[in-house]
Each structure stands twice: as C-alpha cells, then as structure tokens.
C-alpha cells in the first residue's frame, strides 16, 4: 500500500516533510511506502480526502470544519502546539481603525476558508459583530500593504514571511495578534477508512512529521533558504517567521475539540457553513495510542 500525503505550502510541517526522507523511513517500519500529492489551496484538503486522492493532509483550523459540514468522513490525527505569533490582522499604521468594532462596514483581505476565517469570525463575534453582516471579506490580490495605505481595504490578515515583511515596512500596525483570539493550531486529519484500518500507519506518518518539525527547528537557516527559493521573499523574513512557530505536535485533546466546536458554532451562526457540525464525530479513539507513542519516540 502506498500512503499519499497532501502537501501545500501553508502547512509548514508537511511542506518540509516532503523535502526530507523521513516519510519513507518511518513507513518502511510498518511495511509501507509513501508519496506526496502537491496542491496549492489547503481549503481543498477535505475534498481530496473524500475522493481518496490523499490519505492524510494538514491545514489550519477551518478546513476540517468545512469538510465535516460538507459531509466528508474525516478523523483528526494530531495537532500542533498553539501558534500565537503565526499571523496577525493588520491595519494602516496611521489609519482610523483602532478596534475590531471599527472594521464594521469595511473590507478585510484574508485567505477565505483558512484559519484566517476562524480568526476574523471569532474576533468579530467577541466584539458583537457578524462575519456575514458587518464587513466584506475578500481574497488577497497582491500588494495588500499598498491597498491598506490607499484606503482600498481596512484590514489584512497576514502570516509567515509576508507578515514579517509587512511589519518591517513600517506602513502597517497590528490590530490583533492571532494568539489573542485563537490558538491557531496546525491540524492533521485523515480519511476515516484509512485511519481506522491502519492506525499504526497513522502513527508512522506522525513520527515522520515530528522528525520534520525537529529538523526545521534545528536548521532554521537552511529551511528559510528552501522557502525563499521556492516561494520568493527574503531568507531573513522566512527565518524570522519559522522561528515563531512551535515545531511541536500534540495528540488530539478535549481542549482542541472544544476550540473547534466553538469555531464551528460561530461559522454556522453566520452562515459560513450551512449546517451544524459535531466536531467530536471526527475523533477516533483507536488512534490515540499509536499517535501518542509516535510523539513520545526518540
């Protein structure tokens, strides 16, 4: 059996794992081999699992919720530690937006359907506003710093090296740090049939991800050079962004399930998903021992 992992550049653990040999090494221990399926949009992960193009993928917090809402039968396998400095909601440095309430009636740029939707929807909810009714959410077009400066948009959720670069310019300021609102975990999930039949394989994949995370944490300069060559930007910006991530995986916990349920409830209330979701339905207790052992290994 060949195990297929989905890879896109917004999930750093999988992004670097696909450039290392750890997946083959760990899968060989359970008599399997692996391959990577590369795609550009992490919001497609649920659909790729549903049609068995991939067996396991990783995103931020929102895509598994929308996948459940779409009826895809998935299970959570592991999550990262919280990433409080991964992203931020930016506004013009000298502009009029000083609180989330000031965003009402304005336009905010974000990667719709990603963890950024979770951040904005919850921040608005906490301020008594609605993601659906009180602002316009649009996708990035490029040159967001200039769009903020011109007043074309009121806010922009940025992450990674792009966030580091924007802050270095001095033209923007942080309205909300991600960690002030959500935990912003990296989330790994799989096809239920695959995970239920082969929990030891899920454990092997988790061990490979753990090793990839450790490699990045110990080789920030090399990892930054890889990202800059592939994605553009300055290596120093990528290095700074990578240094802000925890590079630590954790088992699925009751706290994480509660975080996801809160998000799912907000999404349903504002119409981002069209039906209620019971996040706990995506738990698979049979995975716990294999995943825990993988995360506690040497």
Image: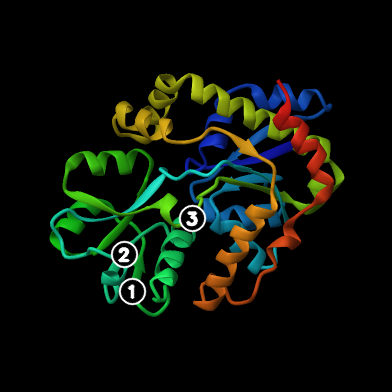
Q: Is residue 1 left or right of residue 170?
A: right
Instruction: Give the Cα distance between marks 1 and 3.
Output: 20 Å
Instruction: Give the Cα distance between marks 2 and 1.
Output: 7 Å
Task: Indicate which label's residue lies in the foreground, 3 or 2.
Answer: 3
Q: Quadrant of the N terminus?
A: top right
- Quarter of image, res 109: bottom left
- Quarter of image, res 237: top left
Q: Is residue 248 left or right of residue 106?
A: right
Between 134 and 74, the residue placed more toward the observer is: 134
Residue shown at 59%/77% (left/top)? 274
Q: Is residue 30 left or right of residue 163?
A: right
Marker disc for residue 182: 3
Q: Quadrant of the C terminus?
A: top right
| N-terminal label among 3 and 2 | 2
| N-terminal label among 2 and 1 | 2
Residues at discs 3 and 2 in contact (Cβ within 8 Å): no
Between 4 and 135, the residue placed more toward the observer is: 135
Considering the numbered disc 2 on the image, is that residue within a helix, a strand or a loop?
A: strand
In percent of width and height, residue 287 lies at: 80, 44
Marker disc for residue 108: 2
Classify 10 Å Cα crowding around label 1: few (below 14), some (14-19), many (20 and above): some
Residues at discs 2 and 1 in contact (Cβ within 8 Å): yes
Considering the numbered disc 1 on the image, is that residue within a helix, a strand or a loop?
A: loop
Q: Is residue 189 left or right of residue 84?
A: right
Q: Which residue is mark 1?
A: 135
Does residue 1 appear in this view? Answer: no
| N-terminal label among 1 and 3 | 1
Residue shown at 50%/19% (left/top)? 218
Task: Give the mark count.
Answer: 3
Residue shown at 50%/25% (left/top)? 216
Does residue 19 appear in this view? Answer: yes
Residue shown at 37%/28% (left/top)? 239
């Amino acid at each position: 059996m060949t195990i297929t992992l989905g890879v896109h550049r917004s999930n750093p653990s999988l992004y670097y794992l696909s450039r290392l040999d750890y997946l083959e090494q760990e899968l060989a221990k359970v008599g399997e081999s692996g391959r990577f399926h590369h795609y550009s949009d992490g919001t497609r992960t649920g659909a790729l699992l549903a049609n068995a193009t991939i067996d396991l993928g990783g995103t931020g917090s929102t895509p598994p919720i929308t996948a459940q809402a779409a009826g895809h039968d998935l299970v959570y396998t592991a999550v990262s530690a919280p990433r409080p400095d991964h992203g931020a909601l930016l506004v013009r440095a000298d502009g009029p937006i000083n609180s989330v309430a000031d965003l009402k009636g304005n336009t905010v740029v974000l990667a719709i359907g990603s963890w950024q939707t979770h951040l904005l929807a919850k921040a608005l909810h906490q301020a008594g506003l609605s993601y659906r009714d009180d602002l316009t959410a649009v996708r990035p077009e490029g040159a967001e710093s200039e769009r903020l400066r011109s007043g074309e948009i009121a806010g922009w959720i940025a992450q990674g090296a792009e966030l580091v670069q924007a802050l270095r310019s001095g033209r923007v300021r942080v309205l909300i740090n991600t960690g002030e609102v959500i935990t912003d975990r990296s989330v790994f999930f799989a096809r239920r049939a695959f995970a239920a039949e082969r929990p030891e394989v899920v454990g092997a994949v988790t061990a490979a991800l753990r090793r990839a995370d450790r490699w990045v944490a110990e080789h920030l300069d090399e990892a930054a050079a890889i990202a800059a060559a592939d994605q553009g930007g300055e290596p120093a910006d990528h290095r700074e962004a990578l240094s802000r991530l925890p590079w630590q995986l954790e088992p699925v916990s009751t706290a994480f399930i509660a975080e996801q349920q809160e998000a799912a409830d907000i999404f349903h209330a504002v119409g981002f998903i069209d039906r209620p979701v019971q996040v706990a339905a995506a738990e698979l207790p049979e995975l716990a021992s294999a995943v825990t052992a993988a995360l506690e290994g040497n």
